[in-house]
Amino acid sequence: MNLLYKSTRNSDKTVTASQAILKGLADDGGLFVPVSVPKLDVTMDELKDMSYQETAYAVMKQFFTDFTEEELKHCINSAYDSKFDTEVIAPLVKVGDTYHLELFHGATIAFKDMALSILPHLMITSARKNQVKNDIVILTATSGDTGKAALAGFADVPGTKIIVFYPKGGVSHVQELQMVTQKGENTSVVAIHGNFDNAQSGVKVIFEDKELAAELDAKGYQFSSANSINIGRLVPQVVYYVYAYAKLLENEEIQAGEEINVTVPTGNFGNILAAYYAKQMGVPIAKLICASNDNKVLFDFFQTGVYDRNREFILTSSPSMDILISSNLERLIYTIAGQDAQKDVELMTQLKEKGVYEITAEMKEGLKDFVGGFATEEEVKETIHDTYQKTGYVMDTHTAVAAHVCAQYRKDTKDEKKCLVASTASPYKFVRNVMTAIDPKYDEMEDFALIDELEKVSGFPIPNAIKEIRDAEVRHTTECDADQMKETVKNILGV
Ligand SMILES: *Cc1c(COP(=O)(O)O)cnc(C)c1O
């Protein structure tokens, strides 16, 4: 069966999976969604014995139906290989009474690697399938994690180039070092004099520049995006929820058919939406618990049905969740509106123009699988500290948001179901906040000294991603003003 995709803002037109991956965003500004979420066609009993790569194939073949078996397996095997520091790719670790699904064992030690290590392969395969002759130029604006994971994913991938813009002074020292030391002949990293918003709108302007697109086409290039709105990033994230459930079963932590809850530290709503898709595919998931930090737009939304971004933007110790517009929520809105593109457009227009919208009582019914929760900065610190004291396990700040929300939910509801926590970053990536939560005395030490301390207290060996940046050569020193981004892109590409 051939599964087609349509835009959340127009139900009439459909495209294939490979076309949706190539485009990223639909022309009408909507997000691509499958016409219906496919069911798994293998049993849990079969999945129980599968490797990560085999599970990935079982899930992705249901979504990417215009890829051949050979193409899909090639993409999967090129992505989930020795770039990960463990053969199981996504280990499941029991911490107290919850199960942490560690999604940070890839090249850049954040969960973005789970999807960005395969997206480049899906994209060049899609280009070939659609007779695209041009090289694909990936343009990305980043506030830290996405840029590095995209660079690592696209580095030296034939037929692609990648240009990442980050705000000078707007990312952490470790994040900057990770990007400016990136290897690969096809990679470029540019620091802009401006903030993340300037970088993001600069990239959008370049995408919309028809003249530039024509110039590029003449030289054999076309732009694409590695944003989390690309369906080629969402589907690979469904895989690890299926895998985790099957492993819980294999390890006899749960019985066949037993329902579990899943807690996800949420920013752009991509990761938790993938868990929702896993549930719709047939994985016995009861509640999807959406964990926010102090930027608790989503918590308020699940409480009231009102999405309101008109509030102060708070900088927290979990920066990858500091976000007021969760772009992937649009896919859920469309679904609970009964796939009503008109309704979706109406609400998204209100969001754009007024910064707020309210869903109908009927749509609210569709949210009953979701629960919202949030953790304050103090609660994040306490969670890291107390978990370390009780179990010896060290978690990062984003994961701690989820761990706190999961524990709070259990306490409030007495819901005893086993709970899976998506663990989205290595503690090494946010070493200062993690170590000072364990003991405030660490605040006096330098970052690299803290890294050595973290190895001692956690017993996790220092990941390669961190070792690499310690004495790596800086390869990218380009800087530009925010209004020179287009010229900079043209210089890099030689057009
Ligand atoms: C991106 C990110 C998140 C948020 O994930 P979404 O899919 O955007 O909701 C959480 N934690 C970390 C470490 C991240 O990098």
Image (spheres, rainbow, N blue to C red):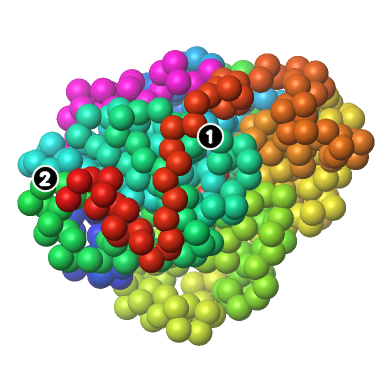
- Is residue 352 something that shows in the picture? yes
Q: Residue at x 51, y 62 (%)?
A: 194
Q: Which residues are magenta?
A: 61-85
Q: CA distance from mark 2 to mark 1?
A: 30 Å
Q: Residue at x 88, y 29 (%)?
A: 390
**Does 296 sit left or right of 61 as displayed?**
right
Depicted 71 relative to depicted 200: above or below: above
Residue beneath label 2, please? 220
Give how far across and how far down residue 187 sits, in percent: 35, 36
Secondary-structure class at tag 1 = helix
Density class for disc 1 (Cα within 10 Å; few <14, some 14-19, many ≥20) is: many
> Looking at the picture, which amino acid does disc 2 mark?
Gly
- Residue nearest the observer in this picture, 139 or 30: 139
- Residue nearest the observer in this picture, 490 or 106: 490
Give how far across and how far down residue 162 sits, in percent: 32, 41
**Mark drawn on residue 18:** none
Q: Residue at x 86, y 44 (%)?
A: 382
Q: Residue at x 72, y 61 (%)?
A: 294
- Residue nearest the observer in this picture, 406 or 297: 297
Residue beneath label 1, please? 178
> Looking at the picture, which amino acid does disc 1 mark?
Gln
Give how far across and how far down residue 481 sits, in percent: 43, 61
| Residue 65 quadrant | top left
- Total number of numbered discs in the rendering: 2
| Residue 396 quadrant | top right
Depicted 474 relative to depicted 478: above or below: above
**Does 151 sit left or right of 209 as displayed?**
right
